[in-house]
Image (cartoon, helix red, strand yellow):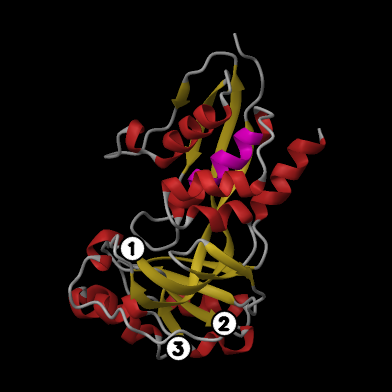
Amino acid sequence: MNNKPFLSFPSPAKLNLFLHIVGRMDNGYHQLETVFQFLDYHDTIELKATENKAIKLLTPIPGVANDDNLIVKAALLLQSTSQCQQGAEIKLKKVLPMGGGLGGGSSNAATILLALNALWQTQLTIEQLAEIGLKLGADVPIFVHGFAAFAQGIGEQLTPALPKTYWYLVSKPNCSISTQSVFTAPDLTRDTPAIRYSDADVENYHNDCQTWVIKHYPEVAKLLAWLVEYAPSQMTGTGACVFSRFSSKKDACYVQSLLPNGIESFVAKGLNQSPLHAAIAAVNDN
C-alpha cells in the first residue's frame, strides 16, 4: 500500500505575445519568431511516486486515450531515458481550454518532466529535460525552462526576455482549432521578415496565424472585432483564444463582465517566471 501523499504542481498557461512565421524547412516544420509569457492561471497536476513502474493517470480526459495523453507520454519518456524503475500515480485538474493556443498539453508534459525528475531523483538537468520535451512538442521546452523568452527555430531556441506584465482578459469563442490544420494550410503566410527583437517593441508585432484563422473561423473574427473596441487584442498561438491587454485587474474584469454569451474567459496576470519552478524547488529542498 502506497501511503505517500500526492504532491501538487501548477501547470501554467502561456501566451504568444506575437507569432511570426519567417520560413519553412524541408521537413515541413515552420521557422518561427515569437515571445512566450506565462500566466498566473494553470492546470493542477497531483503526483506521487510508486515502487512499481506503472504510470497511472487516474483522471482520464474524455475523448483522449491515456496512451495518447502527453502526460503519460512524458512520464514514460522520462522513465525510459533515465532508466528509472519507479512509476507514478497522476491526477489532473484541467482548467485550461483544449485547442485554445494556451499550451495546456505542452505545459502538462513539462510539469510531469520536472516534477517526476524531482520525485524520482533522476537528476537530469534542465537542458536534458528540455531535450526530452522537444520530442513531445515544440512548446514543451519553454515550460521546462520556465522563463519568458524570445523564441526562434521551431520555438526551441530561447533567449530570455522581459516583456511588460499586463493583466490579460483571455477569451475563447465556441470553437477549437487544430494546430496542424493551421500549419498545413496552403494560404498561411510563411514569409514574414525576421526581426531584431526588443522587449519595447513587442506590442507592435502581429500573429501570422491570426490572419488565416479569422478568414476560416468567423467565431474568432467576431470576438476579436468586439474586443478591440475595448483594448488591444490578439490571438495567441494558433488560437482559438484571444488575449486583451489591460493595466489593471479591475479594467480586465469589467470588460469580462460585458462579454457576449457563450464566450469562455478568465482574467490573469502575465508572468516572466513560471510558478512551476518554485514548486519544484520546494520538493528539492525537502
Q: Amino acid at mark 1?
A: Tyr
Secondary structure under the numbered disc 1 in the rendered image:
loop
Of marks 2 and 1, the one in the foreground? 1
Q: Which mark is residue 29?
A: 1
In front here: 59 or 266?
A: 59
Q: Residue 280, how many percent across, how many down?
A: 70, 43
Residue 229 image-quadrant placement: bottom left
Q: Which mark is residue 196?
A: none
User: Tag 1 or tag 2, which sits nearer the N-term?
Assistant: 1
Residue 6 is a magenta residue: no
Which quarter shows the C terminus? top right
Tell me: residue 211, above or below residue 84. Answer: below
Secondary structure under the numbered disc 2 in the rendered image:
strand
Residue 114 is a magenta residue: yes
Q: Which mark is residue 246?
A: 2
Task: Say whether marks 2 and 1 touch (CB < 8 Å).
Answer: no
Instruction: For residue 110, say whether it is visible.
Output: yes
Q: Amino acid at mark 3?
A: Tyr
Q: Residue 87, how many percent across, how many down?
A: 54, 21
Residue 192 image-quadrant placement: bottom left
Residue at (58% x, 66% y) in the render: 158
Of marks 1 and 3, the one in the foreground? 1
Q: Amino acid at mark 2?
A: Phe
Residue at (56% x, 40% y) in the render: 113
User: Tag 3 or tag 2, which sits nearer the N-term?
Assistant: 3
Give the magenta range: 108-117
Q: Which mark is residue 230?
A: 3
Mark 1 Cα-neighbour bin, 10 Å: few <14, some 14–19, many ≥20: some
